[in-house]
Image (cartoon, rainbow, N blue to C red):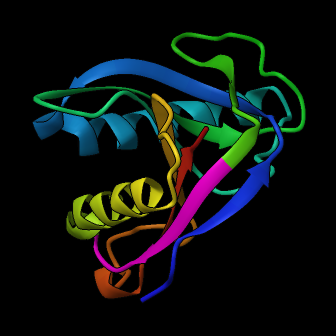
Amino acid sequence: MAEPELTTTDATTTAVIRGTVRMSEIADFYDRSFQEIGRTLAAQSLAPTGPAFGLYHGIPGETAELEVGFPTGRPVEPTGDVVAGSLPSGRVARLVHEGAFDGLGTSWERLGTWIGEQGLTPGSVFWEVYLTEPGPDVDPGTLRTELNWPVG
């Protein structure tokens, strides 16, 4: 199991779709969003510069307020639900979760506990970077998801 670490991130330009989504509908939101963003980027001759991510505004409950998308080299022209966004810069506590998405909650709790043990204060936003592209033929046990939580 990987250990949490502190790192510094630079602000990153992104193309995203934002929404407040019921947790029971989150997988469908991700799938629809990635498809729409992909079409928009292709139409604007804009390629992702890294893997897909989900940026959360606050701790999810019955719903999650989030942005899903891709980093880009320049801002996307807003089209439909696709808008320009950004991932924040600054100090970040990071942990790489290995395994199925249903274990992400435990890894986020572990990262939050570690942040507290370091005497740090977690920020109000946090994001996941999907290092392994999920798909119907991918073994969920091989998925790698980078957890990022800005700290002060």
In the rendered view of the protein, which quadrant contains the C terminus?
Answer: top right
Q: Residue at x 50, y 33 (%)?
A: 123
Q: Position of residue 77 (x, y in %)?
A: 77, 13
Magenta stretch: includes residue 71: no
Q: Nearer the viewer, residue 140 or 124?
A: 124
In the rendered view of the protein, which quadrant contains the N terminus?
Answer: bottom left
Q: Position of residue 115 (x, y in %)?
A: 46, 56
Q: Is residue 57 above or below residue 89?
A: above
Q: Is residue 92 above or below residue 60?
A: below
Q: Quadrant of residue 16?
A: top right
Q: Is residue 34 above or below residue 79?
A: below
Q: Quadrant of residue 65?
A: top left
Q: Main secondary structure of the magenta part?
A: strand
Please give left or right for residue 5 compared with residue 45 in the image.
Answer: left
Mark count? 0
Q: Nearer the viewer, residue 64 or 9?
A: 9
Q: Nearer the viewer, residue 72 or 149?
A: 149
Residue 53 makes an appearance in the image:
yes
Q: Residue at x 75, y 28 (%)?
A: 43
**Which region shows up in magenta?**
92-100
Q: Tell which residue pokes out farthest to the front in this image.
A: 119
Q: Position of residue 8 (x, y in %)?
A: 78, 52
Q: Residue at x 30, y 80 (%)?
A: 140
Magenta stretch: includes residue 96: yes
Q: Residue at x 51, y 81 (%)?
A: 3
Q: Quadrant of residue 21?
A: top left
Residue 144 makes an appearance in the image:
no
Q: Is residue 11 above or below residue 106?
A: above
